Structures are given as C-alpha cells and as structure tokens.
Image: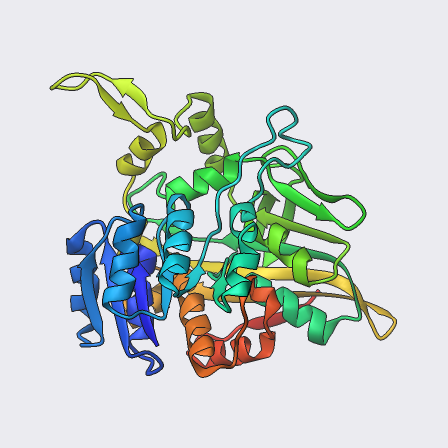
Amino acid sequence: MRVLLVGAGGVGTAVTRIAARRPFFEVMVVADYDPARAEAAVAAVGDDRFLAERVDAGDEAAVVGLLARYRCDVLLNATDPRFVMPLFRAARQAGAGYLDMAMSLSRPHAERPYEECGVKLGDEQFARAEEWDRAGALALVGMGVEPGLSDVFARYAADELFDEIEEIGIRDGADLTVDGHDFAPSFSIWTTIEECLNPPVVYEKERGWFTTAPFSEPEVFDFPEGIGPVECVNVEHEEVLLVPRWVDARRVTFKYGLGREFIDTLKTLHLLGLDRTAPVTVPGTDGPVAVSPRDVVAASLPDPATLGDRMRGKTCAGTWVRGVKDGQPREVYLYHVVDNEWSMAEYGSQAVVWQTALNPVVALELLATGAWSGSGVLGPEAFPARPFLDLLTEYGSPWGLREQ
C-alpha cells in the first residue's frame, strides 16, 4: 500500500509514529502546507518509507498531481474539516481510495436551526456515494476515534452483544489538565468550536434526524479507569449521522464531557462573534486586513500538539448501548482509554491526538490485508468490528467493556 497523508499537525505526526512500527505499507508521503512540519514528522521516525512534500490541501490539482507522482493507493486526510471536500474530490479524480477522521461540514437550517436539520455532516460526501461505488473505489469516512472507533463499537454491540438496541449513545470524557494554562484545548479549537456551537443532531427511528440547542440534555456519566463522573451535553458529531445507516437502533446521541468552564468560554466566543469563519476587516500596519475571527482564536491558543509534556490525566472515548439480549435488559459501555503519560513516553504524542491517529492506521492495515474491503462512501459501521478490535489490541492499546 502507498499512502498520501495530508496534514502533519498533531494527528498527522502521530499517524507517522504509529504507522512506522507496522509493515503493511510501502510508502507514506507526508504532505503539509508548511513543509517544515512535514519534514519534521518524517525526520522523527527515521524510516525511509516516509517522504515529505509540500501541498495546499485546498488545491485539488496539486493533490491529484501528488497522488499520481507517487502512485498512491489511498489518501489519508489529517487536516481540519474545511478541507474534506477538496481532498475527497482529489482522491476520486486520481483514482485513489480515501479515508478521513471528520466529515464534510454541516449548515444549520435557515429558519428552524434547533429543530430541523439543514445540510448534515457528511451529506456532501454521501451525495457522491454512487460515483465511488460505480468506480469500485472506497471512501472510508469518519475513521478516527470519534467518529471511528466509537462506530466500530456500535457495530460490535449490534453483532455480538444485543438482539435489540434501544439506544446508542457516544460518551466522551476526560480528566486532562494542562500545567500553566487556564484554557488550553487538547484538540483543534477550530474543530471544537465547529462541533460544539452548531445545533446538535439526535436520531430517533420514528422521527429520523432532528436538532436541538447546543449543550442540551446535560447528564453526568461515570467514566472508567479513574476518570469518574463528568457532566456531558449534546454536541453535533458524525456518529449520529453514521450509526443509523448501518445499525438498527431506536435512538442515537452524542454527548461530550466539556465541563462548565469550557462551555462558558465557548458561549462567550459565540456572543462576541469570535466563532465566525467569514473574514472581518481589521486595521493593519500596511492597511486593512481581512481575517477570520475563528482563525484568530486558534492562533492565540497553544498548538494542542505541543502540550503533551504539560498534560496530565486520561481521555476516554466510548459507546454506551442499552437494549435486550436473550430476552433480558442489558446495558454496556464499550470504551478506549489513553493515559497521557503513557502516550508521551511511548510515542511522544499527547493522548487526544494519539488516540485519534491510532484508528485510521488500524483501518489502513485492515484494507491493505483485505480484512476490510468495499466500495462507495462507507462509515466504519459498514465493516465487521471484530477484526478491527483484535488488531487494535495487537497494536498495544486494548479496549474495554463495562456492564452497566
């Protein structure tokens, strides 16, 4: 397998460090808008299978050219969601497969944003599913940790743990702290603002997909391995759009353990208009300059990839499932926990970006060996879960199951 990895930020760099320990690929070209980042990621692994290149993820022709020059079989997208569609289209044009960790962006309903869906996450990609299927090509979408591993857990629960599923709820929580910072998100603030301030989507079998207000339906969820109780709220996330396409469940939700301080900060950013992506004009030393308020916020905060040595604690991604097995009620939480101290010592990557990066590498290996195969635009739920979970354990990062 020959891979083009676009994006050498925290997640992309972690991808290289994880993949370097596996033999399933021949070449991995690491491309970034900033060539120094790509070169640093390649230099750190010291493996001649890795090559560094510069590319603008929004320049489809340049990406197509890079895929062709290196005869890449698949494009792995490790950029932020703004670049999903140009990279998705470039892969199809070049005849390569495609894999991402976040899907095409949503747009709220113009008149009833907190009741009805507008353009949903992934709609632009699923609209082109027939084109990919006709070509016999695969776009595996939403294959990070959330979405990604959480969706694999949903498929595993449906196949092996339940006869009927009442509800699937993705529940994400952590007890991470960052020394020396009062506010320092452990993941891309650009993406965090996008998913937390957009109307959350809920799925109910009788109603389909609908929206609610941001941060709605708070609940306290007790996370495993010492993390403990964390208040979680509804957040827009891909799993709610993916799981019902392949798994029969009466209700699907996603709730994120953000914490009151984080929620209040996001609300303040929204109140001030600092969550907007459309440029505003501000004075500059050489005249007026157009800048995106959200980009300014991101540039003002520390790069999450650089925080690992000051982070403490664990992060947990998981899928809570309630239903019936053999005529009896059952409730489980399938989960994956990463300790930041361990991921820093073992890989030099902080826990959140490492946990996200691990899963697309596992998926690439399953595709390379033929354990997973398919065509069209497919989510992780479209594939058997057991090969993925077994390989995840082989990678040295086992998952857990807790009866509730």
Quadrant holding the N terminus: bottom left
Q: Nearer the viewer, residue 181 or 296?
A: 296
Q: What x and y, as percent, mark residue 95?
A: 39, 64
- Whether residue 226 is visible here, answered yes or no, is no
**Residue at figure coordinates x 30%, y 57% from the top left:** 64
Where residue 4 sits, quadrant-wise, is bottom left
- Whether residue 362 is visible here, answered yes or no, is yes
Q: Is residue 145 left or right of residue 199?
A: left
Query: Looking at the image, what colour scheme do you see?
Result: rainbow
Q: Nearer the viewer, residue 386 or 384?
A: 384
Q: Is residue 322 left or right of residue 387?
A: right
Q: Is residue 221 above or below residue 226?
A: above
Where residue 295 sits, quadrant-wise, is top left
Q: Is residue 187 above or below residue 131?
A: above
Number of numbered discs present?
0
Q: What x and y, as percent, mark residue 153?
A: 60, 67
Quadrant holding the C terminus: bottom right
**Residue at figure coordinates x 54%, y 49% from the top left:** 122
**Residue at figure coordinates x 31%, y 45% from the top left:** 58
Q: Kindly give the residue lying farthest to the right in the view shown.
A: 327
Q: What x and y, as percent, mark residue 15?
A: 33, 66
**Residue at figure coordinates x 34%, y 54% from the top left:** 311
Q: What x and y, as percent, mark residue 167?
A: 74, 56
Q: Is residue 302 left or right of residue 389?
A: left
Q: Kindly give the residue lying farthest to the left in the view shown.
A: 286
Q: Nearer the viewer, residue 129 or 18?
A: 129
